[in-house]
Image: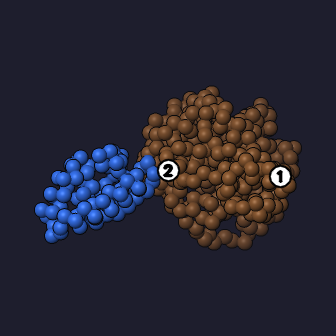
Amino acid sequence: MKIKKNVAISESGFIFNPTTGDSFSTNPIGLEIIRMLKEEKSKDEIRKSILGKYITDESTFEKDYYDFVMMLQSNQVADDSE
Amino acid sequence: MKQKITVAVSGLNNIDSPGPGIPVIRALKESKDFEVRIIGLSYETLEPGLYMHDLVDKSYQIPLPGAGIDSLLERIYYIHEQEKLDVIIPNFDAELANFMKIEPLLKSDLGISMFLPTQEQFDERHKANLYEFGEKHGVDVPFSKMMFSTAEIPTIASEFSYPMVVKGKFYDAYIAYNPEQVANYFNKISAKWGLPIIIQEYVFGSEVNVTALGDGKGNAISAVPMRKLFITDKGKAWAGISLDDEELVNIANRVLSSSKWRGGMELEFIKTAENKYYLLEINPRFPAWVYLAAGCGQNQPEALVKLALGQAVEPYKEYDIGKMFIRYSFDMIVDLKEFEQISTIGEL
């Protein structure tokens, strides 16, 4: 999973895909995950970081992470290159 | 020091289906090289541009295209006597044919410059010929056929699958899901715009457009892609955003180069989920959203004026990505005297 290079992400969680013209907003955790994806961190690294910082369990993380990356892919913000 | 010029511009109908005139004028007023006096050319007395005195210095009514080239010429000669025009930029599809015919005469007799497509270019990009245009210039165009009678529906239906797009030769397009709807739209459109009706394969995707300028020698001077963000019930962009889409710009440049397009144009595409681009339409003039190109750093109307005047123009290389335009409506308060003046003497 890779965030497309030309996608712009602001501090406030505003995401702009200049190829499609679409824009989105994400909450702080979504922004954190996107940043980690942009830094090309693996799913395991992201899992460890989120589970270490927030009170949640592994299965909730799995489900929410899957939903989130599917959304990124379907909106052409990310490639499924992993 | 800026060069002083006088430019006549038509398409002053800045309404919910806006003409390109006012955006072209706004771009010209921002020119770095020209100090432009604007002469508005109008067909109707309620075209808002007539009353926008901060943009349009003087306006003249001109005869409707159906009146022919003699009455148009007579009127242009009169306007030129008063205003000493340097350049004319016609902005309506329907008037282009007349202006193309008188372009050489206006140049030789009055020294007025225009920068219009040739008759051949104008004809080959026509909706009815677009499929062949695509084949010739290597651009994907949805399969289409002309239809002259509803009796042809069963034959046509066997070559297409539903839904299909039913289009008028100038304007209007509807999606038909069965033969009854095809017949209904055929009658509706042909009553308004005449025959033929164009049946086009329906391609699903998002609409992306390009405003572009060719120098007539095969050089693409400018191409700025945009996606509509808000579309009115007439299908017009009420808001849009410039895109970072290299492939789309390359396709536009290929069309400009291969056709040796002379002048402004708008290319309308559908981009599919598989990232394939299908050319739906070519408009042989700038679109009403051309001011976005100027806002992105490519002042296409200014470049067109330079080309018309025979000045050298280097192709633009960059434009701002993610720049938006948002239209708004605005009520002007107009004195009845002004309306009276344009209605009676045809000048304002």
Expressed as whole percent of the image width and height from the top left, the position of residue A27 reads 28, 66
What's the residue at 80%, 54% (across, down)? B153
Tell me which residue sits at (63%, 33%) in the image.
Answer: B137
Nearest the viewer among A68 and B299 is: A68
Which chain is mark 2 on? Answer: B
Q: Give the color of chain A as drawn.
A: blue
| Of B75 and B165, the residue lying toward us | B165
Mark 2 element type: loop
The chain holding disc 1 is B
Residue B6 in sight in this render: no
Single out the residue that lies furthest toward the top: B217
* Chain identifier of the brown chain: B
In the image, what residue type sits under mark 2? Ala
Between residue B1 and residue A21, name the one nearer to us. A21
Residue B206: image location, x then y, percent: 53, 54
Judging by the rendered image, the residue that carries numbered circle 1 is B152
Q: Find residue B168 and report its image quarter.
A: bottom right
Residue B178 vertical placement versus B121 (above, below): below
State left or right for residue A58 relative to residue B198.
left
Q: Quadrant of the C terminus of chain B?
A: bottom right
Which residue is painted at 41% across and 56% down in the image?
A: A75
How many residues crowd mark 1 within 10 Å: few (<14), some (14–19), many (20+)? few
**Mark on residue A11?**
none
Tell me the residue that label 2 is attached to: B273
State the CA–CA distance, disc 2 to disc 1: 32 Å
